[in-house]
Image (cartoon, rainbow, N blue to C red):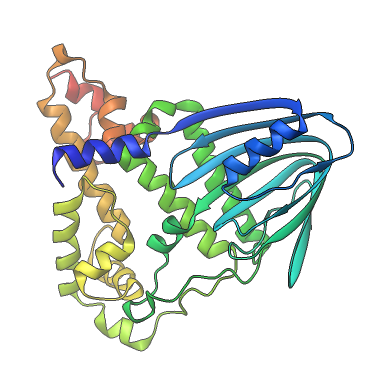
Amino acid sequence: MDDAMEEATARERAPVRRVFETTDLDVARDFMNAAYGTSLRMKGRERSQLVRHARFDHGSFCVDDVTLSMETGYDAEPLGCLAVVEPRTGWVEHRWPDGGERVGPGEIAAISPPDRPFTALAHQLEFDSVVLGQPALDRNAPLPEGRRSEPLRFTGMRPASPGLADRWRGTVAHVRDVLAVNPQAMSEPLVIGNMARALAESALAVFPNSGPAEATSRDGSDAAPGAVRRAVAFIEERADTDITLLDIARAARVSPHALRIAFARHHNSRSPFGCVTQVRLDRAHFDLLAADGENGATVPAVAARWGFPKPSRFAALYRDVYGVSPHDTLSL
């Protein structure tokens, strides 16, 4: 990838913070249509009601906080993405041709299957939501090559278990924590890529879907040292780009399941993305060694460039490997 393409990619993925607030239902309807890319026909009982929508838009995913301080209904065309809501107050009921869900405080659910039209009724609703684009889901769905042309479908709108619901909450909390503590890091392509991957992998694990079955005996046979060598070579070559498990598995010429097994057996990182973290940590170390204190380089900026959005976490990983703090290295 040349410099111009890298810069264009970074600009495309730079986060956009938008806050919208109105008491005019017509204005609110027009905004929500644009925000969710579909046709919403909102129906409120009163004309003057508070609608507030705060969004961090990262391109491949969005993190929203929404207030609908009234009872309202709307009809929508298919969203074409996975939108997961967790109400703080009130409730919302979604209905689609062959199903529906009513969700209240303490519960998590996807709005509807991404490919289905739906209707909704919301009552005094405040909720958090995450919207994941279909490309982010497809990039991280570990389907074998023979099934890559099949559409990924979600077959359940609720987490498969309470434990998996907690996994989703933990992933979303991590993303929101980064937004609160170090929002500047979210302009870095590797940070955004890591966040999108974490959310997509969590969604695919938490919500029932048509993804791949468990590992097969062939996966175990394919999980050889050669696959690890090919994967590591690819990771070292592409560490500065947003790579996925599927990308690494293709380079290793094995399935994603086989790749995971191979790393668990034959590599000290124990996982493909453990290896990615190791390599990127090494690259950050070299950047700190090469940095000139006069040019304004900082540890948080170097860390974020290599996909580490939390300076404290980066410092702990760095000290474990190099025995000193990254600030000590920068000051050399």
Please name the residue shown 77% across and 53% down the image.
120
Residue 240 lies, in percent from the top left, at 21, 45
Residue lying at the far top in this picture: please name it.
294
Against 202, residue 258 (above or below) is below
Count how many numbered circles sit on residues in the image: 0
Q: Is residue 306 visible?
A: no
User: What quarter of the picture does the C terminus occupy?
Assistant: top left
Against 159, residue 87 (above or below) is above
Judged left or right of residue 109, residue 10 is left
Residue lying at the far right in this picture: please name it.
45
Residue 53 lies, in percent from the top left, at 65, 33
Please name the residue shown 25% across and 76% down the image.
254
Residue 257 lies, in percent from the top left, at 36, 74
Residue 248 occupies quadrant: bottom left
Please name the residue shown 23% across and 29% down the image.
324
Residue 189 occupies quadrant: top left
Against 114, residue 28 (above or below) is above
Q: Is residue 24 visible?
A: yes
Residue 111 lies, in percent from the top left, at 67, 56
In this rendered view, identify the residue nearer to me: 176 or 20. 20
Residue 34 occupies quadrant: top right
Please name the residue shown 12% across and 18% down the image.
292
